Amino acid sequence: MKYLLRVLFVVALLCGGSSFAHADGIDFRMTVLDPPAEAVCNPAGVPVGSPGNTNCTIFTGGDISPVNVSQAACNGAGFGNGLTPGTYGCFVVDNESGSTISSIELGFLIAPLVTTPSCDSSGQTNNQDNFVASALNVVSCAPDLNNPLEYALDFAGGAGVAPGNALIVLEQGEDPNDFQGGSATIGVTPEPDSLLLFSTGVMMAGLYMSRRIWTAAGKSADGNR
């Protein structure tokens, strides 16, 4: 009898713990995708109705604010089949900076979400049943230590997003209307050609300055004779 009471007590604890976990709210998932090369954005000047996503932010450098997640952006980018309306959204960025996007740090207010984020780099299947790999790996996915009222969702590493390609931030599990007015800090890596050009310029400038220094030194030595 005593053994049976102990078993019932343990079962009661497990049930209570399970109920408490559900009370914490539904976790939302956040991931960063790099779709195929075909355009998912609608560049400036392209007539409305042309292929592409009109809910797209053009990135040429610097931070982006505000960041607003929407279901329409997902649908325009070809993601949404099999997902429950009102529980997913996207933020689409067209990389026109001339450099590869190597990181993105997203900030969203925790309220009214009151849920636990779950970030991953496992990719996503699009509307054509094609698997789309993640562009960046997960660095952190938790409340911001410097601002406890805001989530810090950081992604870096991985393949990155090349110039002319699009970056898609996909959120699943929460109403996209709760992800409004956020911010994005984007890090870039110059393309190899740009690095080569910069290195060549620095080298030529160094040779020029060295020549001037040696010429000036030679003239000074001649004048002291």
Image (cartoon, rainbow, N blue to C red):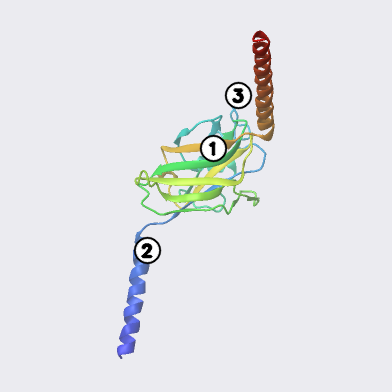
28, 152: nearer the viewer: 152
Report x, y in % for residue 106.
46, 42
Badge nearest the viewer, 1 or 3: 1
Q: Is residue 158 above or below residue 1?
A: above
Any mark on residue 21, and which? 2
Report x, y in % for residue 220.
64, 12
- Residue at 36% x, 58% y: name it: 24
- Residue at 68% x, 10% y: name it: 222
Residue to which mark 3 is pinned: 45
Q: Is residue 182 something that shows in the picture?
A: yes
Q: Is residue 188 above or below residue 143?
A: above
Question: Looking at numbered disc 2 in the image, what kind of residue is underneath it?
Answer: Ala
Q: Residue furthest top?
A: 223
For the residues labelled 1 and 3, the Cα–Cα distance comes to 27 Å
For the residues labelled 2 and 1, the Cα–Cα distance comes to 36 Å
Identify the secondary structure beneath mark 3. Answer: loop
Q: How many marks?
A: 3
